[in-house]
Image (cartoon, grey):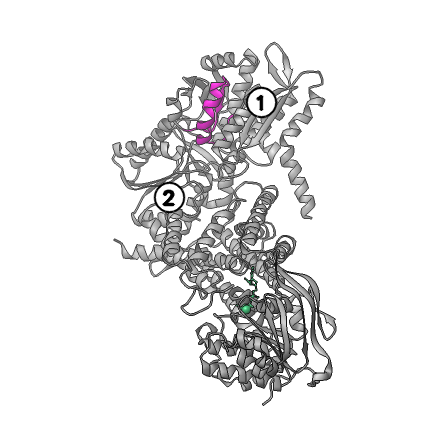
Amino acid sequence: MATTLDRRTFLKVAGGGVAAAALFPRIGRAQATPVRIGFTLSATGPYSVGAGITQGPNYHLWVEQVNAKGGLLVRGQGRRPVQLIHHDDRSEIETAVRLYEKLITEDKVDLLLPPWGTAMNFAVAPVANKHGYPLIGPTVGSMKLYELNLPYFYAVLAQPDSMMRALAEFLKDLRSQARINKVAVIHVADLFGLEHQAALMPLLREAGFDVVEAKSYPLGVKDLSDLLKSIKAKGAEVFIALSYPPDTILATTQAKAVDFNPAVFYGAVGTAFPFFRDRFKASAEGVFGIGAWNPKVPYPGAKEYFDAHVRKWQKEPDRWASAFTYATLQILEQAVGQVSLDRARIKSYLDATEFSTVVGPIRFTRGLNRATPGMVGQWQKGEFEVVWPRDRATARPIFPKPAWQ
Amino acid sequence: MNVALLLDVAAGGLLMGGLYALIAVGLNLQYGLMRVLNVAHGEFLMIGGYLTYMLHVHLGVNPLVSILVSGPVVFAGGMGIHALLFRGLLRLKRTQEELEANSLLISFGLLFILQNAALLLWSADIKGYQYLDRPLHVLGAVFPTNRVVAFGVAAMVTALLFVFLKGTLAGTTVRALMQDPVGARLMGVKVPRVHGLCFGLGVGLAAVTGSLVSMLFELTPFIGLPYTITALVVVILGGLGSVTGSLLGGLILGVLESLGVHFTAPDLRMVISYGVLALILVLRPYGLFNPLAPRPGQASQA
Amino acid sequence: MSVGVAAGQPLTDSAGPLLEVGGLQAEYGDIPVLWDLSLTVRAGEILALVGANGAGKTTLLRVLSGLLEGFLKVRRGTIRLRGQALKGLDPAEIVARGIAHVPEGRHLFPGLTVLENLKLGGYMRLARADRRASLEQVFETLPLLRDRWRQLAGTLSGGEQQLLAIGRALMQRPTLLMLDEPSLGLAPRLVAMVFELVGRIRAGGVTVLLVEQNVRQALALADRGYVLEAGRIVLEGRGGELLEHPKVKRAYLGL
Ligand SMILES: Nc1ncnc2c1ncn2[C@@H]1O[C@H](COP(=O)(O)OP(=O)(O)OP(=O)(O)O)[C@@H](O)[C@H]1O
Ligand SMILES: [Mg+2]
């Protein structure tokens, strides 16, 4: 039994890239040489969870859709099949850098897609930039990256400044409804956590909140229950975890287990994962998370994207960066269709165009997408509703958070 | 300083310590007995966790009952792996150093294989389920119910192990072999067989710990190694070859970690572990409770 | 007093050799330690094996019990117990054939009680009743062990440890008991006690191969003896004869 299962799963995993390539003799018919697109994602290690939920499935979904249309439309060359060349960076930053160098100099890929996570992109972006490869990061939250001044790097998510400003504004708004004052903030000791924390703390103080706890914890942390107990003992009414998926789950599990039920419970990456809802069932109700997207948003293609994802993977996309990942691919597709594979021209096109995507309009200002505001989402009856800012909201927030179920 | 909170935190540490103890006892049965440092020990914990996860989520088996499957299955698998990979090593060994080095290499390979097999079987996605995750109020303190239950089961399994080690001839043989392999061979003990048994027992205990861990934490194929490291710290803390030492060592480390984290930050949990390790190596290199620590006037052991 | 009677072995000298070693060569790595060594042990006798430090006495006993660990290898030669080849067998199999070995350094289990040490001696006796009978006999022979049955072996005095090591070997009900320097490091009173015990054990029907540096007492007690020098047998004879041999007198008795 083990053998067959092994083999089947192995084929599924190993064949991911091959499968895309295998489609091409049938669909690409003609002699068209494939457009080769390279990337690494973490298949192992602490980043693998996020990579495997938010990025991998969307890359493969997009390639399948493009190839089903007969290939990627390259201006002046018609449709060419897409072939993915990808590797496991094992959540090791040096490995990722080495692999991207290899993709560029040895494999000579036509285009690059980014790896998962802020720290990874931080390391890989300069490499892509040096060689003039545009890189549109769907899972990057860092202002530091922009201080590096990398003209070929783009980011679609709202960045720490606007994301944390949205959170602070939202908290102020809630405070006008009921007394919340004591705030505890924990963050993962990784570029993502550090920057968000640095952006959030002054905003909280400015707004007059009493920060009763501010601590960091390591990537891959095993246990947060002691920390949660002391936060509970300090009477925190707002709990903010600037966390990565495994620790978002951990903090939620353990908060529930030590009976810590603050009026506001906010987690970062991972909160918007369907896995979160499935794992916590009724207890997910009322949990807030960083960023938000759901198939009810009024942008063209949003619902279709959601359905296609479910059809292909038998699982829903996550309710934040998945859709943004897909949006980066829409952008890339449009750019190549308009200007061909000339990477310098792609860059100019990215700089000058407003794109219509499944997450709404995206427009880059010096590499940053300033068209998407910071947002807050909340699990409500099985859907991750956009609750802030008001003009983007798909539902009104539930506040204070109901008891753990 | 809030004394109640402190006690609460310490008790929380004690509960985790129970799990540390269980996994460390398992490692000690291997390392204390054969000097086979099985760096894949934690992978068996991971496998035990997944077995329980599958039994619970797909077949609705109670996680506690699943221990009756995960323990024995991994025990048998461990005996098989031992016969396949380690038995030959033991037969061919010429020096202790050679054995230690080779077994380290083999178990590294094993770690890699088991981790990748888990990755193929279960993917890198986080897996978890809810079981007894309501708070339990005891004397004003709050504990996760599942942790209290896990601790209780760990204590029971350990008690059973003690009955085996102290109360049966087979168990006495294991202890004898730990204390003096030459003496044991001269008594007619079939060493490879006992090693196999202990390897199986060791990883079986890891699997049982994994079943308990799956009630408390999410699973990924990568959860094993940190537990191996913790187990190693506990084994050294308690003393090589001392089952009692591993037990107390696990509890002590659990409490120290929790208090340490409480007063500093979760960032420092590993630092605290390593600090304890360094301190022990300097102050009591034979561990706190090692019955084999050299005493004045006693010949050194082979 | 009777001591663990060996399974139906005649006690006469003439019964043919119990153990026969022929042309044995053993090496540590590539360094030979035993050279073309031949000797016989007759059933029922006490055979003394004497020699200076490093002569190879311990090595011989290790070869005989199959403790070929580390770099110790048997290059050539035969070992037969009542005609059956022993070479290449595992210690467990050799123990099962009736050879017990009280090794140099005793190799007790220090963290186990006296009783547990003895029980392990009876490890090969599968029947519980059988083990109990052996235990009773050993307690009768060595009453001191009965008094201290709950004490940890590691906390016994040196002499007591030696008695326990012998008692543990007797639990195996051996045909041949090999003792490696049982009197080493003991006070004179205890040395005498150990030699007296060896006499009693033989009287109980167990053949004894006694390795000793305490040459005078060993040869006085033994029926026969061998002198080992640098891995070779250099002298052989009745105990009394060897005691009188000028070479022995010079080299070992300081006369
Ligand atoms: N493990 C070993 N590796 C290498 N050489 C060894 C080893 N053990 C013993 N020897 C060597 O083999 C030779 C015989 O040693 P052995 O211990 O048999 O002597 P012995 O007659 O028992 O000495 P003693 O009276 O001191 O106990 C010595 O030269 C010794 O140095
Ligand atoms: Mg010797």
The image quarter containing residue A4 is top right
State whether residue A403 appears in this view: no
The image quarter containing residue B286 is bottom left
Establish whether labels 1 and 2 are both on one chain: no
In the rendered image, residue A93, in percent from the top left (x then y), is placed at: 47, 32
In the rendered image, residue C106, in percent from the top left (x then y), is placed at: 52, 71
* Image: A299 above or below B214: above
In the rendered image, residue A118, in percent from the top left (x then y), is placed at: 44, 30
**Left or right, A69 with reference to A379:** right
- Residue drawn at x 35%, y 43% is A263
Disc 2 marks which residue?
B267
Contact between marks 1 and 2 (CB within 8 A): the answer is no
In the rendered image, residue A219, in percent from the top left (x then y), is placed at: 43, 40
Query: Which label is found at residue B275?
Result: none
Give the Cα distance between marks 1 and 2. Answer: 39 Å
- Residue A401 is a magenta residue: no
Query: Which label is found at residue A106?
Result: 1
Amino acid type at circle 1 is Glu
Report the image quarter containing ligand 1: bottom right
* Image: C250 above or below A377: below
The image quarter containing residue B267 is top left
The span shown in magenta is A113-141
